[in-house]
Image: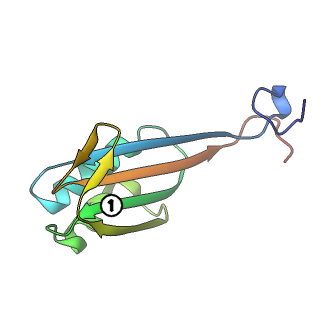
Amino acid sequence: MDARSPGGGPDAAPGRWVAVGRSSEADARRAGCEAALGALSQGGAKLLIVFCSDRYDIPALLAGIRERAGGVPLIGCSTAGEIATGGPADASVVVTAFAEVPRAGWRG
């Protein structure tokens, strides 16, 4: 088995995870905080992707996300509808976090 494939023992590649947070909160800053908190349920996020309704005050929304995410790189766009694990919605924000968590002993 390739040492970089999942399940390859102590030399296996880092673990990867994706988590999604969503909020329909009317207040932009609170919506950003709530969605980011849901997406950052585990440590080690390396990238956030944000999809949000254009009804939000974008600077306030981003301030809320940054309050929870700190300096994690972020990209995103406004949308006509947002899709998350619970299905499609309008007038909401969705934050998706991607991470790679090193495993002990990995020599990548």
- Image point 33% across, 60% down: which residue? 51
SS type, badge 1: strand
Q: Look at the picture and state if 93 lies above or below 4.
A: below
Q: Is residue 6 left or right of residue 69?
A: right
Toward the viewer: 23 or 73?
23
Q: How is the image coloured?
A: rainbow
Count of numbered circles on the image: 1
Q: Is residue 9 left or right of residue 101?
A: right
- When asked about the image quadrant of residue 11, the answer is top right
- When asked about the image quadrant of residue 81, the answer is bottom left
- Image point 33% across, 44% down: which residue? 84
Please state the horizontal and vertical placement of residue 38, each as a whole percent of the image: 33, 41
Please state the horizontal and vertical placement of residue 73, each as a whole percent of the image: 49, 65
Please state the horizontal and vertical placement of residue 14, each as a whole percent of the image: 71, 41
Q: Is residue 94 left or right of residue 103?
A: left
Q: Residue furthest left?
A: 26
Density class for disc 1 (Cα within 10 Å; few <14, some 14-19, many ≥20) is many
- Image point 86% across, 44% down: which residue? 107
- Image point 80% across, 36% down: which residue? 5
Q: Is residue 47 left or right of residue 103?
A: left
- When asked about the image quadrant of residue 28, the answer is bottom left
Toward the viewer: 77 or 80?
80
Callout 1, which amino acid?
Answer: Phe
Q: For the N terminus, give its image quadrant.
A: top right
Residue that carries the numbered disc 1 in the rendered image: 51
Please state the horizontal and vertical placement of residue 9, each as a whole percent of the image: 83, 25
